C-alpha cells in the first residue's frame, strides 16, 4: 500500500514539474532562412562574383602598369583628367539620387521615387555619353585596343617604317586612281605624301647601311615624332629606357619641343597626323599597345555594367514604386553603388597614375 502511494506521488510530482517547465521555458521563434529577402540574398551572391571579377582585372592592370618599362602620358593617349573627374562627379551624384528614390519609395511617394529614378537614368546616360566622347577622341587618332584598326606601335623600328610606307602607298594609289587630272587639293596631298616618303626613304637607307647604329634608330625616331610628337620629356626618357631610342641623351634630337623653334605647330605639339587628318599614319607611343588593351578592357566592362543598370532604371519607370516595391529599388541601388565604387578605383588608376 505504501509503495502504491509513493508511486502515485512520484507520478504527480513529475507531471507538475513537466507542466511548470512548459510554462516557464523560454519560447523561441525560429527563422527558416536568412532574415533578408531572397532577392537581396541572390543579389549579394551576384555582387560577390562581380567583386572577384573586377578585382582580377584591376589587379592585373596594376601589375602590368607598374611593371612596364614605358607607359604613355595621359596627353599622349588623349586622356583628359578634368573630363574623368567630371564623369566621377556625375556617377557619385547618381548614387545620391538612387538613395533618394529608395527613401521616397519607403514613404510611399511613388511619383517622387520615379522622378529620382529618372534623374539617375539621365546621370548614368551622361556618364556613358562622356565615355563615348572619350572613345571617339582615341579612335580619331588611331588608338584602338588591337590591330588592324589600331595604328599604335610600341617602338619605331623596321616594322613601323614598313607600316608607314604601306599607308603612304595606299593613299597615293587611291588619289592617283581617281583620274589623270588631279585637283589642287589632291596635288597638295601628293606633295605631303612625297615629303613623308622621302623621310621614310632616308631612314630606311641608314637602316640598310648601318642597321645597328644609333643614327639609324634616331632617323626612324625622328620620323615617328614628326608624325606624332610626345607631349613631355618623360615620354622620351621612357622610350630610351625601353630601348626605342639610343641612350646617353641621343633622344634630345628627336622632338621638336626640345629644340628652340618658332614653328607654331611644334610649340603646340602637333604632328603630321594632327596637321593633315586624312593621313592617319601609324604612330609610335612607348607602351601604347599595352595601355590601349588594358584601358579599353577595364572601361569597356565597366561601361557594360553601367548600361545594364540604365536598362533596369528604364524598366522601373513603368512600375509603381510604392512601399511594396521598396525592396526592388534597394536591390538595384546596391548594384548601382557597386558600379560607382568600381569607377572610384578606376578613375585614379587610369587618369592620375
Image: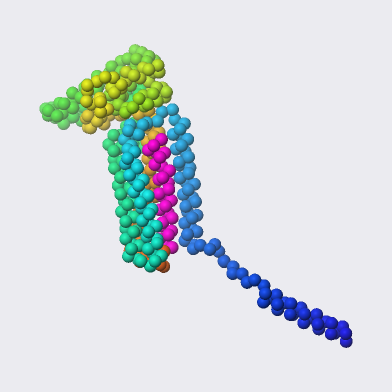
Q: Residue at x 43, y 63 (%)?
A: 327
Which x, y percent locates residue 291?
39, 34
On whether residue 341 falls in the magenta region, the answer is: yes
Residue 190 occupies quadrant: top left
56 to 245, vertically: above or below: below
- The C terminus is located in which quarter? top left
What residue do we see at 18% from left, 23% from top? 191
Residue 51 visible: yes
Q: Main secondary structure of the magenta part?
A: helix
Foreground residue among 210 and 116: 116
Question: Which residue is at the far top?
Answer: 209
193 on left or right of 26: left
Q: Position of residue 322 (x, y in %)?
A: 38, 67
Please give the range of residues in magenta.
Answer: 327-353
Say which of 119 and 315 sits in front. 119
In the rendered view, would you say 218 is above or below 323? Answer: above
- In this orientation, which residue lies closer to the viewer: 165 or 228? 228
Q: Quadrant of the N terminus?
A: bottom right
The x and y percentages for residue 24 are 67, 74
User: Can residue 153 be seen?
Assistant: no
114 is higher (above) or lower (below) than 57: below
Residue, x 38% and y 43% (percent of image)?
299
Answer with left or right where residue 55 lies relative to residue 259: right
Residue at 67% in and 72% down: 25
- Which residue occupies the extreme bottom position in the image? 1
Q: Quadrant of residue 175?
A: top left
Residue 115 to residue 179: above or below: below
- The answer to if 49 sits in the magenta stretch is no
Amino acid at each position: 500500500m505504501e509503495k502504491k502511494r509513493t508511486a502515485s506521488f512520484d507520478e504527480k510530482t513529475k507531471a507538475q514539474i513537466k507542466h511548470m517547465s512548459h510554462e516557464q521555458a523560454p519560447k523561441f521563434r525560429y527563422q527558416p532562412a536568412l532574415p533578408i529577402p531572397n532577392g537581396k540574398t541572390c543579389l549579394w551572391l551576384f555582387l560577390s562574383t562581380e567583386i572577384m571579377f573586377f578585382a582580377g582585372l584591376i589587379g592585373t592592370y596594376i601589375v602590368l602598369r607598374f611593371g612596364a618599362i614605358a607607359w604613355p602620358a595621359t596627353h599622349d593617349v588623349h586622356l583628359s583628367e578634368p573630363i574623368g573627374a567630371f564623369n566621377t562627379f556625375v556617377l557619385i551624384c547618381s548614387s545620391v539620387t538612387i538613395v533618394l528614390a529608395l527613401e521616397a519609395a519607403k514613404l510611399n511617394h511613388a511619383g517622387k521615387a520615379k522622378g529620382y529614378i529618372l534623374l539617375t537614368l539621365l546621370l548614368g546616360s551622361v556618364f556613358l555619353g562622356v565615355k563615348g566622347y572619350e572613345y571617339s577622341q582615341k579612335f580619331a587618332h588611331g588608338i584602338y585596343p588591337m590591330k588592324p584598326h589600331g595604328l599604335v606601335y610600341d617602338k619605331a623600328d623596321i616594322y613601323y617604317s614598313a607600316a608607314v610606307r604601306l599607308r603612304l602607298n595606299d593613299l597615293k594609289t587611291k588619289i592617283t586612281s581617281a583620274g589623270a587630272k588631279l585637283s589642287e587639293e589632291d596635288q597638295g596631298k601628293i606633295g605631303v605624301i612625297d615629303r613623308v616618303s622621302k623621310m621614310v626613304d632616308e631612314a630606311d637607307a641608314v637602316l640598310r647601311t648601318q642597321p645597328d647604329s644609333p643614327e639609324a634608330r634616331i632617323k626612324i625616331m625622328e620620323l615617328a615624332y614628326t608624325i606624332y610628337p610626345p607631349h613631355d620629356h618623360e615620354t622620351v626618357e621612357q622610350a630610351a629606357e625601353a630601348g626605342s631610342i639610343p641612350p646617353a641623351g641621343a633622344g634630345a634630337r628627336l622632338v621638336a619641343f626640345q629644340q628652340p623653334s618658332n614653328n607654331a605647330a611644334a610649340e603646340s605639339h602637333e604632328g603630321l597626323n594632327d596637321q593633315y587628318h586624312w593621313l592617319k599614319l601609324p604612330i609610335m607611343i612607348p607602351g601604347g599597345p599595352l595601355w590601349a588593351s588594358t584601358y579599353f578592357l577595364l572601361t569597356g566592362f565597366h561601361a557594360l555594367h553601367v548600361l545594364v543598370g540604365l536598362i533596369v532604371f528604364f524598366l522601373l519607370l513603368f512600375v509603381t514604386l510604392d512601399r511594396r516595391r521598396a525592396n526592388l529599388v534597394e536591390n538595384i541601388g546596391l548594384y548601382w553603388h557597386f558600379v560607382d565604387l568600381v569607377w572610384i578605383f578606376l578613375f585614379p588608376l587610369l587618369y592620375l597614375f
